[in-house]
Image (tube, grey):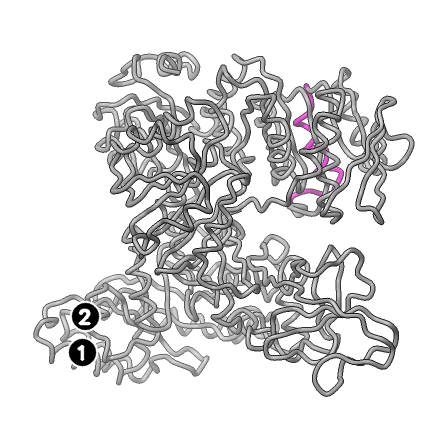
Amino acid sequence: MNSFARELSKILNISNPPHYQPDAIIEYVSVDSRNIFLPEKTLFIALEGNKTTGADYVESLVSLGVVNFLVSNKYHSKFQHLAANFFFVENPLMSFQHIVEVKRSEYQVKTIGITGSNGKTIVKEWLSEILQKKYHISKSPKSYNSQIGVPLSIWGLNDKHNLAIYEAGISKKNEMGSLEKMIKPNIGILTHLGDAHQSNFKSKEEKLIEKMRLFVHSEILITKNSLVVEHNNAFQLLKNENKKLKIITWGETDNSDIIIKQIEAQKSISVSYQQLNYTLHFRNFEPTFIENCCHCIAVILVLEGDLKNYIGEIEHLNSLEMRLELIEGIYNTTIINDTYNADLDSLKIAIQFLFQQSPHQPKTIILSEILETEESYKEIENLLQNRKLHQLIFIGENYASLLSNFQKLPIDKVSIYSTASDFVKYHAHNTLKDNTILVKGARKFHLEDVVQFYRRKTHSTYLKVHLNALKNNLSEFAKRLRLETKIMIMLKAHGYGLGSVEIAKLLESERVDYYAVAYTDEGIELRNAGIQKPIMVMNPELSALEKLIDYHLEPEIYSLSILEKMIEAVNKNTIYRDSKLSIHLKIETGMHRLGIIEEDIPRVLSILKSSPNIQVKAIFSHLSASDEESLDDFTESQIQVFIRVSEYIEKELGYPTTKHILNTGGIIRHTQYQMDMVRLGIGLFGFDSTGILQSNLQNTISLISKITQIKSLKVGESTGYSRKGMVTKDSKIGIINVGYADGYFRSFGNGVASVFVKNQYAPTIGNICMDMTMVDLTDVIGVEEGDEVELIGNHILATDLAQKSNTISYEILTSISSRVQRVYWED
């Protein structure tokens, strides 16, 4: 790789790039300015976003020692004076893809390409786990399957790899072609065809055809027989284009190439392939789990010709949650749980995630052995070279001989324990107080025991917050706006109950310009977590004036009296008399809640003109019916009043302000009035009361609990208070550790709501108790005590529950109790 910089000019058809250093070493690539491990060996790709560009960070990265940049041509004059390698191109992303395409062509490694609506990442991780003893595998880290994720995955390919497994995901037409050129799979896997991104395609078949562009040069395609039968035309089109392609199917029917039959009573499957027969037994027999196993079995039969050496590994596969999980821990710690595997690519992502957390908290890494080569340990040294750590704790005896190398790094303390159990027993855990702790390692080292030890709350009910879904929803709203329009994110009520700090930290690098909170304390909490962007406080307390100024918070002024009291408080305190306080004027336009009434505006202007230490940062109002078509005339009247009043105020003040009136419904239905900024609230969390954008939004929460006990009831017996849960036939009842004290409403009882367990729905039975809920499991197959159940999530939407209780989604979200732990998932 050291000579790769010399080749870039040739690959990109660039002659004499400014300040070109042909011997510069390029070993890493980065698209995130916050995550540069070894700057002198990194190529920074300045991607062009909807509103921001990586080019904004180039000059600061040069000062940090980054030497190589791939940048858009339009910045040529801006950067040509800087002493670094600049490769100026038309489109940095497309050029990076081309670089990786050329790099990939240098390796004749057997490659498996996986696509499908779901199951891609699980199948990839399982195949890697099963085959790692025989193969040195290059694979996509986590779910890196996008236009940028795929080239980042393939960049790590090197001479030592003899098998590559990459996944590819698309969301619209004409995306798979570029991914196929980079992956070049010999063997293809098509896992599933579902409804994801369906709005971008005319039909499922059109989406399938686009997905199968990944296999236009493959030798073998593995998929379910039922999929081929249902979409025979699409598969025939692929066969016509790729004459050499052999499609190998698996399924229960005799016309499948690999016949796999499920024996549910024994939790086993029988496999028949080319006169070979096998039987495999599983603890988990959930349909999706078994389907993903079948994909793996089919690949191994095709790749190896025999299953016998892999049966043990397959039978012991466990469900994997492909995520980075943030958990509140003891000793005021924050735990990042990433304990499902250990490889260098996923370690790099995990370290990046760790250092994106609060800059004020010290960082610690607890790391098991990496199940790769000895060179891996040197690579770990490189990854940590420029990272300030409080403690680095190794689990595994192989680190003992390398301890001195790591002690030279900028780490306060390095220690080693043979096992996770030894760490839990003997480490001085109070020394990790206030730390953000990354727990990372392969499952065989049982680091989940470490996570469980540090977990603050042990209540089996938890609220899972899907961070990638939040990003998707933000993007969907941003698409409707002009590039120059600012976005304010509403984080009142603890971020609608999901956690304002965690959400704000996630969105700091996204297209977000402002945050809004209800009270001063909420704004201070964001500032203490390292949030730098402007924050509006909607209900400022005069008693907290000093804190408003100290923490650079911007109060909403909604009446003449609150303005007078605010200025009086500023003038009384000589310390703050010369400070500049930015305020947001809220104008009453017809909602008749908080807002300055029109007749008070002359007096407000008079006060502001005589108060040089007060600056009007923004003028805004609130629409009361932006999502209701029948009230559009009223909404229009509100907007026109606001335009007239805000223009008058600006004229009188003599300077421009930021004007905003659109909320979530307004962004969707009245986009033409986006003005300078919009306010995004419930839409960020996946709820659209207009219904117009709902199909493009993703669910952001899952309320999960467990079945504590299963009981058998005879006819005439009952469960719960007042004998409301009377059974009319012999029944099986499950008791779940969640109740109305957790925010699961009492009105959900007696069959009004259901839970989702083992891929089936089970209705509630009897009254919801304070801490428990009973469900009817009589018709649910395969359920056991300890199984997780979904109370809210992808299968049971909060909007549906809200309708059942005659309320709105806001109340469902904000009612979830604080005793329910919030777990944040970076999928």
Q: Secondary structure at mark 2?
A: strand
Magenta stretch? 200-217
| Side of 725 relative to 656 (left or right) | right
Q: Which residue is mark 1?
A: 567
Q: 4 or 719, which lies in front? A: 719
- x 61%, y 58%: residue: 694
| Side of 606 relative to 692 (left or right) | left
Outermost right residue: 254
Is 628 included in the stretch rendered in magenta? Answer: no
- x 28%, y 28%: residue: 66
Tell me residue 281's x, y (percent).
77, 40
Residue 530 in sight = yes
Q: Quadrant of the N terminus?
A: top left
Q: Which residue is mark 2?
A: 614
Label 2 crowding class (10 Å Cα cut-off): few <14, some 14-19, many 20+? some
Label 2 sits on what residue type? Ile
| Side of 712 relative to 519 (left or right) | right
| Side of 550 relative to 818 (left or right) | left
- x 76%, y 15%: residue: 244
**Image quarter for residue 374?**
top left
Outermost bottom residue: 722
Is 203 included in the stretch rendered in magenta? Answer: yes
Q: Up-down: is 184 above or below 615?
A: above
Label 1 sits on what residue type? Ile
Tell me residue 815's x, y (percent).
53, 74
Question: What distance separates the C-alpha of mark 2 from that of mark 1?
Answer: 8 Å
Q: Are marks 2 and 1 in contact (CB under 8 Å)?
A: yes
Label 1 crowding class (10 Å Cα cut-off): few <14, some 14-19, many 20+? some
